[in-house]
Amino acid sequence: MEGCMVRLRSVHFRGALSAQPIIVNFHELFQTRDAPTILPMIKNEDVLRAVVALLDTSLPEIGPRDVHETVHYPGIHTIILSQDHADVLKDYRGRASQKETNLSPVPCKTRVEADSTHKLLAELYSDSEESAEETSEEIIATETSISWSWERFCEGLQEFVDRARDRKEKRAVQREDGKIPPSAVGVESLIVAAACYELKILSTGDMVLQLSLLAVRKRYRHLGIGSYIMELLKTQSIVGKYDTLVAHADTDAIGFFKFHGLTDDPLLNDQFKELKDDWTNSILMSYLPPFTTDLEMRNPVFSLSLREVEMDMDVARSQALFAYQQQVMCVTKLLEEVKILRKQLDLQREEVDRLNSKLEQEKRKRHDIENKFLMYRLKNTKELLDHIASDSEQEQAKPGTQEQETAQSEEPPIQTPEGAGV
């Protein structure tokens, strides 16, 4: 999308409501000298304040400063749906009287706290929006161009809200005399809805359209405005070419996004996990556009013949079949691998049991051998002791024998008749 602002054709919604969609890049708009006005006779700064007020009132859990930094961030585009001044004036004249809201002045200093700013912005849509809960979230100031823009945003905020109060008081006069001056209609009455998106390139190389904020004024809900914005985001000839549309959905908005073709499949959306840290307390949802987008259909050489559709179907069928075959092959191989591993495990268990049995046998054999060896040593020791005892007895018996031999040797020789001694 070229330029910092694009105007589209007016669209009619249910309830005789007509609005003109405008896509604007506020960051580029405020850096452009002599930038065109977004809405006729209204300052662009006031349009920005009204958009931030609408988003902050509809999404109070985010905080006014975070909303402003998102809307004014480089690369962020904002879709604004605004009514015609004459239509709003006619609507006010025919609207039933409403309970008047007390408007008390709230000072807006150069550096405004988040809760005070939220109260101030909520007054712009107090006639059509529910009062939001106060937030006390601490905002960390940063020395950036965005921080400077936030200061400028707050400088004229009090005056802007005061003018909105004056317009509201003028509209209250209509309930008495039946007339309402055109000056009683301001930008806070013209804007119906707003949405912020950004085109990002992921680390995978995919182009993603990230929807950051989406809000519709309460009294204009259930008229198809949110659905129209979703159709704009799906129209790549308007927002630019992308591979996937990603949204951060609150719990209450999951049904709305599912109705428009977005899925919260965690496995599919895991490929966009680098976007999960952008917003907290939300669910990441994604939309995959068809193969043939409206951007391609606008090509002069494009033709949507039946033959080409059949060819696309054949290609898609072949791709799906190939993916299925690859998955089946992978699962089959895994099953066979599991069977082999189980078989190896059973064999290893059998081998372990066999080794354990053999080990027990060897232990028993060793025990028997040790017993035999002990018995052998005991037997040898006993025989040795018996032998020693026998030798001892023999030694004790030897001294008597020697005395007998000595006595015999001392006997006188026997005389023989021949007279010779023996």
Image (spheres, rainbow, N blue to C red):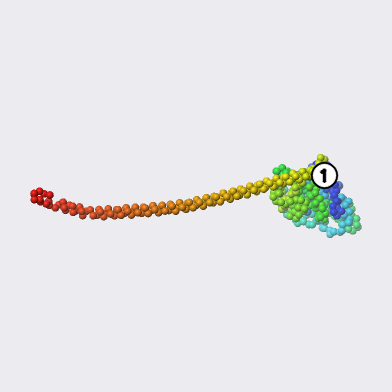
The residue at the point 69 percent across, 50 percent down is: 267
- Quarter of the figure with residue 90: bottom right
- Quarter of the figure with residue 103: bottom right
- Depth check: 236 or 317 in front? 317
Q: Amino acid at mark 1?
A: Val
The residue at the point 50 percent across, 51 percent down is: 354
Judge from the rendering whether residue 320 lies leftward or rightward of residue 365; answer left or right. right
Which residue of the protein is positioned furthest toward the top in this rendering?
Answer: 301
- The count of marks equals 1
Q: In the rendering, at what x and y percent does residue 372 appear?
A: 39, 53
Q: Report the quarter where the N terminus lies.
A: top right
Which residue of the protein is positioned furthest toward the left in this rendering?
Answer: 418
Judge from the rendering whether residue 282 lies leftward or rightward of residue 43; answer left or right. left
| Element on which disc 1 rests | strand
Q: In the rendering, at what x and y percent does residue 142 appear?
A: 72, 46
Q: Do we see residue 48 in this rendering?
A: no
Q: In the rendering, at what x and y percent does residue 115 appear?
A: 75, 54
Residue placed under numbered mark 1 in the picture: 6
- Depth check: 267 or 27 in front? 267
Q: Do we see residue 408 in this rendering?
A: yes
The residue at the point 87 percent across, 50 percent down is: 84
- Depth check: 342 or 16 in front? 342
Q: In the rendering, at what x and y percent does residue 295 appear?
A: 80, 43
- Depth check: 189 or 172 in front? 189
- Quarter of the figure with residue 74: top right
